[in-house]
Image: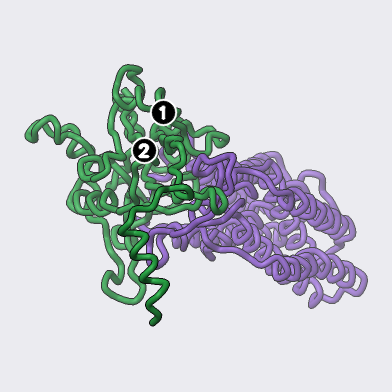
Chain colours: A purple, B green
C-alpha cells in the first residue's frame, strides 16, 4: 500500500489523543497518584483535543474531493469509515464540555465532571475500534484482515496516552509513580502485541496468482501488464519493502516506540529530570509513527497478483 | 436480473480493442471524462475501466498464453459499496450494476482498497472514483437498435470473446455458456461472488508436427537453405 502521510497522521495522532482522554478518565476516576489537579487536567484535555484535531484535519488531506467530506457521516449503517467519522465528531462536545467544566468550576472529579470525562473517554475508545475495523474488514489485504489490527490500535493509542500523561506529571513536578508504572505496562503490552502481529502476518496465505486468474493447477507467470507506465493501481498498491530493510526498520521502530520511552520514563521518574520525560513522549510518537508507516507499506493488496506477484 | 459479462479465454486474442472501445465510449459517457495524464509524454497514464493482462500458463513446452481482460465484476457481495462512507458507491437493485455517483464521491480511495479486482481507479483531475458502468448509457438507450444495446467492449470484440447478458436467467446465452463451458469466477475464496464469469480455454487434441509428411516444395526449400551459405 502507498503509505500516505495523511492516513498515518490520522491513526497516529487521533489514536494517541483518544488514549490521552481514556487515561485521563481512568486517572481521575480512581484518583491514581492523587488524581490530576485542575491545571494538569486542562493541559491533558487540551493535548487530547489537539492530537485528535491534527488527526482529523490531516485525514481530509487524503481526500481527492474534500468538498464532499460532509457526506462521509451518512453511511454509518454499513461503513466503518463513516462510523469513525461519527464517533470522532461525537467526542468533541464531551471533551470540550469537560474542559469548560474543569476550567470554570475547578472540579476535576465531581459527578458532573466525571460523567462528561468518562463519556469522552468511552467515545474515544469506540472511535479507535472503528479506526481499526476500517482496515480489519478488508479481505483484500491479508496483513490487515485480522482482529489484531484493532487490538494493536488500542494498545498503541493507550500507550501513547499513558506516556504523555506520565510525562506531563513528571514535567509538572507532581507524584507519578503509579502513572509511570501504567505507562511502562502499556508500552510493554503494545510491544508484545506488535510482536504477535508481525509473527501472524509472516505466515504466507491468501489468494495466489493461480486463483486470481483461475488456473488453479498450473504454474502462472505474467507476460505483460498491458500498460507502458504505472496506473492508479500500481501507484496505490504496488509498494513493497525488501525483507532485510523491513527487519532493520522494525528493530529501529521497537527501540524508538518502546525501549527508549520505557527507559526515559524510568530515568525521569528517578531523577525528576523533565528532559527525559520529553524524550519519552517524542520517541513514542516518532516510533509509533514508523510503526504506522510499516503497517501501510507492508500491506500487500491482492490486486498485485494481476501485476505479476505470485502471492501476497 | 443480474447483468454482467462472460469472457471467453479460448478466443480472446489480446488485442486491447475492448479497452480502447471502452475508453472511447465512456470518456463522453455518464462518468466522463476518463482523464489522461501525460498522454504523449514519457510516462503516459490515465483512467481506464478495462485493462488486459497477459499471462503464461504452464511450463514449456506445455505452456500457453492467456490474454486476460478485466473490468468491474459487478459482484453480488460488493464490498466496495459496503465500505463507502458517503453513499456514492451503490449497487442497483434492479440489475445489479455497481455505479459511483460522481456528485457524492469524496475521493477517499477506500472502495479501491476493498476491490480485489482492481476495477476502480481514481481520476486525479475530478478527484472522484471511476469504474465500469457496464455502458449503462448504451444498454438502456431505446433510441439505438436493439442489437446495439450492449456494452461497447462487447460490440467491438473482433473475436466474439465477450458476451453480455443476465446471469440470473438460467436460459440466457451467458448462463448457458457458463454451464456448458465450465465458466468460473475469479478468487472465489474471497467470497465477493462476482457476476462476471470466465470461460476456460477448450481442450484441443494437440496438432502433430513431428511425423508430418513434408511436401516436395518444402523439402526443396530446406535443401536449398542447407546448401546455400550466407
Q: Residue at 27%, 60% (x, y): give it.
A: B35
Q: Quadrant of the N terminus of chain A?
A: bottom right
Chain of the residue on which disc 1 is drawn: B
| Image-quadrant location for residue A259 | bottom right
Same chain for the residues under marks 1 and 2 in the image = yes
Q: Provide the residue designation for mark 2.
A: B8
The answer to whether one can see residue A108 in this image is no
Q: Residue at 17%, 52% (x, y): give it.
A: B28
Q: Within 10 Å of the Cα at label 1, are there few (<14), some (14-19), or many (20+) other Cα atoms?
A: some
Q: How many marks?
A: 2
The answer to whether one can see residue B56 in this image is yes
Residue A149, how many percent across, how many down?
67, 47
The extreme bottom residue here reads: B230
- Give the camera-side residue of B175 and B125: B175
Chain of the residue on which disc 2 is drawn: B
The extreme left residue here reads: B143
Left-right relation of A148 to B165: right
Residue A244, how many percent across, how many down?
73, 69
- Give the camera-side residue of A285 and A276: A285
Looking at the image, residue A55 lies above or below residue B212: below
| Image marks 1 and 2: residues in contact by CB distance under 8 Å | yes
CA–CA distance between discs 1 and 2?
9 Å
Residue B46, how many percent across, how many down?
32, 62
Secondary element under disc 1, as helix, strand or loop, is helix
Left-right relation of A152 to A57: right
Q: Which mark is residue A114?
A: none
| Image-quadrant location for residue B75 | top left
- Give the camera-side residue of B219 and B11: B219
Q: Provide the residue designation for mark 1.
A: B181
Residue B203, how many percent across, how many down?
46, 35
Q: Residue at 63%, 59% (x, y): give it.
A: A298
Amino acid at each position: 500500500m502507498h503509505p500516505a502521510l495523511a492516513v498515518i497522521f490520522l491513526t497516529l495522532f487521533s489514536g494517541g489523543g483518544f488514549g490521552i482522554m481514556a487515561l485521563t478518565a481512568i486517572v481521575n476516576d480512581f484518583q491514581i497518584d492523587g488524581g490530576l489537579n485542575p491545571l494538569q487536567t486542562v493541559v491533558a484535555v487540551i493535548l487530547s483535543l489537539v492530537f485528535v484535531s491534527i488527526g482529523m484535519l490531516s485525514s481530509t488531506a487524503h481526500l481527492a474531493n474534500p468538498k464532499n467530506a460532509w457526506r462521509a457521516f451518512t453511511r454509518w449503517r454499513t461503513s466503518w469509515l463513516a462510523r469513525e467519522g461519527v464517533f470522532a465528531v461525537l467526542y468533541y462536545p464531551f471533551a470540550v464540555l469537560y474542559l469548560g467544566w474543569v476550567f470554570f468550576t475547578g472540579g476535576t472529579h465531581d459527578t458532573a465532571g466525571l460523567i462528561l470525562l468518562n463519556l469522552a473517554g468511552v467515545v474515544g475508545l469506540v472511535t479507535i475500534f472503528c479506526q481499526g475495523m476500517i482496515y480489519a474488514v478488508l479481505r483484500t489485504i491479508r496483513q490487515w484482515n485480522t482482529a489484531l489490527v484493532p487490538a494493536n490500535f488500542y494498545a498503541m493509542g493507550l500507550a501513547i496516552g499513558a506516556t504523555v500523561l506520565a510525562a506531563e506529571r513528571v514535567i509538572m513536578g507532581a507524584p507519578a509513580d503509579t502513572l509511570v508504572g501504567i505507562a511502562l505496562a502499556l508500552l510493554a503490552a503494545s510491544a508484545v502485541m506488535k510482536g504477535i502481529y508481525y509473527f501472524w502476518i509472516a505466515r504466507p496465505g491468501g489468494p495466489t496468482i493461480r486463483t486470481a486468474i483461475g488456473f488453479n493447477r498450473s504454474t502462472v507467470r505474467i507476460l505483460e501488464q498491458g500498460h507502458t507506465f504505472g496506473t492508479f493501481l500500481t501507484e496505490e498498491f504496488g509498494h513493497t519493502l525488501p525483507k532485510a530493510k523491513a527487519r532493520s526498520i522494525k528493530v529501529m521502530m521497537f527501540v524508538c516506540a518502546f525501549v527508549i520511552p520505557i527507559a526515559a520514563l524510568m530515568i525521569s521518574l528517578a531523577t525528576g529530570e523533565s528532559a527525559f520525560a520529553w524524550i519519552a513522549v517524542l520517541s513514542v510518537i516518532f516510533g509509533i509513527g514508523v510503526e504506522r508507516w510499516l503497517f501501510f507499506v507492508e500491506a500487500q493488496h491482492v490486486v498485485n497478483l494481476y501485476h505479476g506477484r505470485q502471492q501476497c | 436480473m443480474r447483468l454482467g459479462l462472460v469472457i471467453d479465454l479460448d478466443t480472446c486474442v489480446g488485442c486491447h480493442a475492448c479497452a480502447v472501445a471502452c475508453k472511447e465510449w465512456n470518456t463522453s459517457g455518464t462518468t466522463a471524462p476518463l482523464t489522461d495524464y501525460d498522454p504523449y509524454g514519457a510516462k503516459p497514464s490515465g483512467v481506464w475501466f478495462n485493462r488486459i493482462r497477459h499471462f503464461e500458463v504452464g511450463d514449456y513446452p506445455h505452456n500457453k498464453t492467456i490474454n486476460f481482460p478485466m473490468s468491474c465484476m459487478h459482484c453480488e457481495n460488493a464490498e466496495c459499496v459496503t465500505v463507502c462512507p458517503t453513499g456514492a458507491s451503490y449497487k442497483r437493485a434492479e440489475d445489479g450494476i455497481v455505479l459511483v455517483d460522481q456528485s457524492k464521491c469524496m475521493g477517499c480511495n477506500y472502495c479501491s482498497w476493498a476491490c480485489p479486482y482492481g476495477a476502480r481507479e481514481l481520476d486525479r483531475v475530478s478527484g472522484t472514483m471511476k469504474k465500469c458502468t457496464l455502458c449503462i448509457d448504451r444498454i438502456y438507450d431505446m433510441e439505438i437498435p436493439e442489437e446495439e444495446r450492449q456494452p461497447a467492449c462487447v460490440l467491438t470484440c473482433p473475436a466474439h470473446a465477450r458476451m453480455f447478458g443476465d446471469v440470473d436467467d438460467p436460459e440466457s446465452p451467458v448462463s448457458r455458456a457458463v454451464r456448458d463451458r465450465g465458466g468460473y469466477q475469479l478468487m472465489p475464496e474471497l467470497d465477493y461472488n462476482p457476476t462476471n464469469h470466465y470461460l476456460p480455454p477448450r481442450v484441443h487434441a494437440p496438432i502433430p508436427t513431428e511425423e508430418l509428411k513434408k511436401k516436395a516444395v518444402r523439402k526443396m526449400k530446406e535443401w536449398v537453405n542447407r546448401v546455400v551459405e550466407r
